Image (tube, coloured by chain):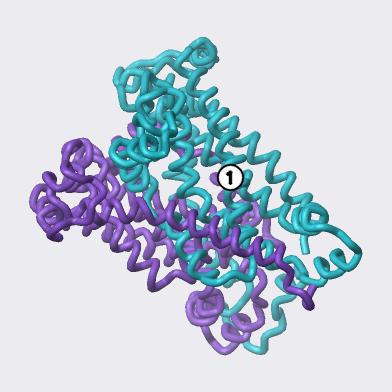
């Protein structure tokens, strides 16, 4: 492969500059310029600006600031608001990952059967994925006020009969339900594709050998799905750690700060004014968390992918 | 396996159908409520929230359109989405192509590839706080700034998808094109682009939806200037303004969803492909 580019016709009959490899590569450098410049200006600079100011006491408003080393970070870990937000995120992420895997795996396994209306089911289950998270959040906000309590009362389910958003414990689950309602769409489609990549004769051979459904699932289906399951875990973990839209639309962090996720806390601190360097330092902690999680899950995935069919 | 379709598997299929139908109801019921409420008057909803509208009224929709500049927000969203997509189409495949053809032989391109990939690991919150101040300094706390941010943040994933795809396309065709007198740009534009069309379509659909639906960035950059709001931002602010008018709120959600719904009906294949490809590589 590498030889191909290196020996890209050095022996052309005509020596025009235009076609020469040298000229081509020069143009290729130019091709990368717009994106490189935009990436530097709109991503790298703000990111380093954030890292830089997280070590200062700049309020964002004043003209002066001092270097304070790790002071902001020290303060953050003594800040109950931040600790609570972080705990919310961790609990929420675990629940979201498990919920997403269970629901989408069940849906995918069911839709992989030979049942009527398969494509119709798939179209409907995927539809929430194309909507804006904020729209979904706002719609469910109304449903939790006007519709869910009526169902709770009719069915005699206590938790549902009052507005789930008004209570600290149930608000957690309310946000999770909405997130799953929309968030299972893509994983389900991915898992269906994974299931269809499993060779049918493997199942037949296992059946002849006397394996029951659960054994076939464990020994054949799961290994084939592992790369996809890993992808789902990575994306869902990131979504859980950085959740913002649903919470903004459903609870805005309430009731009584119970659902205030780190993303919302950072946003509030950034917008409030006067807490610039502090808000930046908070975001750095989220950064480290997401980076660690992504690193480990990606490492896990790339190992698994070697055994993928 | 094939001889006796036994009772067990039949029962399993029936159970599967029941579970799936229940799931479908879970998905569709919110839309049903949204539609009936959007077409009812406030008095009707107060009397019975779940009943079908006695007379299907369009007052709520007219209310949304009159009380807000719905069409302005709609066109803002269109302008921002179309501009972002055009810029992504112009710049990103070009960059991915240069990287794909040189990353094995030249360090710069290899470095650039991984350098751009870094952004995938960085949560948006990290640049969110500096952006509030920084975009102000640049004088870009406006739609132009938002478009630039969308293109930049889309580029990491798009370059990753496209570079890998272009590397699977042999360079012979463009080489012979340039021997035939095509410029490097011409070879790229007329030979390479058509070959990578499927992946470009995937990338553009994915990002069009992403830009159209995005809430956090417009909230950050545009919230203080109502004339520049996008649809998601408008919905959020409209809802805070008319908290108790469910009918009008649902009408506003419905008219925001309809364009996406139409796109989904006509381009479902591409949308499903785009979103799943996006999930795989993020």
Residue in the picture at 49% in, 33% down: A48
Question: Left of B164 or right of it: where is A224?
Answer: right
Residue B58, position in %: x, y?
12, 59
Identify whether A79 is placed above or below A123.
above
Chain B, colour shown: purple
Chain A, colour shown: cyan
**Quadrant hosting residue B102:** bottom right
Neighbor class of circle 1 (other Cα within 10 Å; few <14, some 14-19, many 20+) is some
Identify whether A262 is placed above or below A110.
above
Residue in the picture at 51% in, 25% down: A88
Identify whether B105 is placed above or below A279.
below
Question: Would you say residue B79 is visible in this rendering?
Answer: yes
Identify whether B217 is placed above or below A74.
below
Tell which of A147 and B195 is nearer to you: A147
Q: Which residue is mark 1?
A: B118
Question: Left of A36 or right of it: where is B15?
Answer: right
Tell which of A141 and A213 is nearer to you: A213
Tell which of A220 and A268 is nearer to you: A220
Residue in the picture at 37% in, 48% down: B214
Question: Would you say residue A305 is visible in this rendering?
Answer: no
Image quarter of the C terminus of chain A: bottom right
Image quarter of the N terminus of chain A: bottom right
Residue B217, position in %: x, y?
36, 43
At mark 1, the secondary structure is helix
Tell which of A240 and A17 is nearer to you: A240
Residue A246, position in %: x, y?
40, 39
**Quadrant hosting residue B109:** bottom right
């Amino acid at each position: 492969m590498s030889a191909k580019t290196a020996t890209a016709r050095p022996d052309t009959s005509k020596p025009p500059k235009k076609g020469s490899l040298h000229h081509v590569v020069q143009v290729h450098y130019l091709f990368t310029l717009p994106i490189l410049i935009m990436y530097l200006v709109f991503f790298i600079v703000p990111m380093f600006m954030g890292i830089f100011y997280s070590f200062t006491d700049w309020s964002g408003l004043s003209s002066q600031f001092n270097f304070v080393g790790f002071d902001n970070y020290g303060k953050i870990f003594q800040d109950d608001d931040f600790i609570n937000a972080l705990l919310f995120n961790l609990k929420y992420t675990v629940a979201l990952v498990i919920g997403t895997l269970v629901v989408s795996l069940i849906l995918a396994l069911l839709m992989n059967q030979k049942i009527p209306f398969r494509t119709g089911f798939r179209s409907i289950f995927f539809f929430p994925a194309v909507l804006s998270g904020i729209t979904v959040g706002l719609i469910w906000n109304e449903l939790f006020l006007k519709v869910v309590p009526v169902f709770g009362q009719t069915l005699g389910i206590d938790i549902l009969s009052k507005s789930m958003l008004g209570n600290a414990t149930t608000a957690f689950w309310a946000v999770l339900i909405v997130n799953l309602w929309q968030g299972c769409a893509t994983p389900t489609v991915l898992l269906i594709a994974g299931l269809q990549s499993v060779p049918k004769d493997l199942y037949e051979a296992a059946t002849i050998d006397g394996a029951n459904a659960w054994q076939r699932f464990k020994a054949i289906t799961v290994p084939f799905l592992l790369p996809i399951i890993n992808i789902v875990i990575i994306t869902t973990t990131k979504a859980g750690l950085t959740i913002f839209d649903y919470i903004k639309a459903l609870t805005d962090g309430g009731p009584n700060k119970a659902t205030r996720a780190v993303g919302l806390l950072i946003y509030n601190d950034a917008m409030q004014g006067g807490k610039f360097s502090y808000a930046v330092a908070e975001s750095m902690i989220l950064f480290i968390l997401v980076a660690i999680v992504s690193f480990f899950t990606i490492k896990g995935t790339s190992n698994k992918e070697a055994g993928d069919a | 396996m094939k001889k006796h379709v036994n009772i067990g598997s039949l029962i399993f299929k029936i159970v599967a159908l029941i579970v799936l139908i229940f799931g479908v109801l879970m998905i569709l019921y919110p839309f049903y409520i949204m539609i009936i409420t959007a077409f009812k008057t406030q008095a009707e909803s107060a009397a019975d929230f779940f009943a079908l509208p006695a007379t299907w009224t369009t007052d709520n929709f007219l209310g949304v359109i009159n009380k807000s500049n719905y069409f302005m927000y709609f066109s803002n969203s269109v302008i921002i989405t179309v501009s972002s997509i055009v810029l992504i189409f112009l710049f990103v495949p070009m960059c991915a192509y240069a990287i794909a053809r040189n990353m094995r032989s030249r360090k710069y391109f290899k470095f650039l590839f991984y350098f751009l990939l870094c952004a995938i690991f960085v949560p948006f919150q990290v640049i969110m706080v500096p952006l509030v101040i920084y975009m102000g300094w640049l004088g870009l706390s406006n739609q132009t700034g938002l478009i630039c941010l969308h293109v930049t943040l889309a580029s990491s994933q798009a370059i990753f998808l496209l570079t890998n795809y272009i590397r699977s396309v042999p360079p012979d065709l463009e080489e012979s094109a340039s021997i035939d007198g095509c410029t490097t740009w011409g070879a790229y534009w007329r030979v390479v682009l058509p070959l990578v069309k499927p992946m470009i379509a995937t990338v553009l659909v994915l990002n069009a939806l992403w830009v159209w639906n995005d809430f956090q960035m417009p909230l950050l950059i545009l919230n203080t200037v109502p004339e520049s709001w996008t649809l998601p931002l408008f919905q959020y602010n409209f809802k805070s303004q008319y908290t108790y008018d469910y009918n009008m709120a649902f009408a506003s959600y419905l008219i925001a969803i309809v364009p996406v719904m139409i796109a989904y009906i006509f381009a479902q294949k591409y949308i499903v492909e785009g979103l799943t490809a996006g999930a795989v590589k993020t």
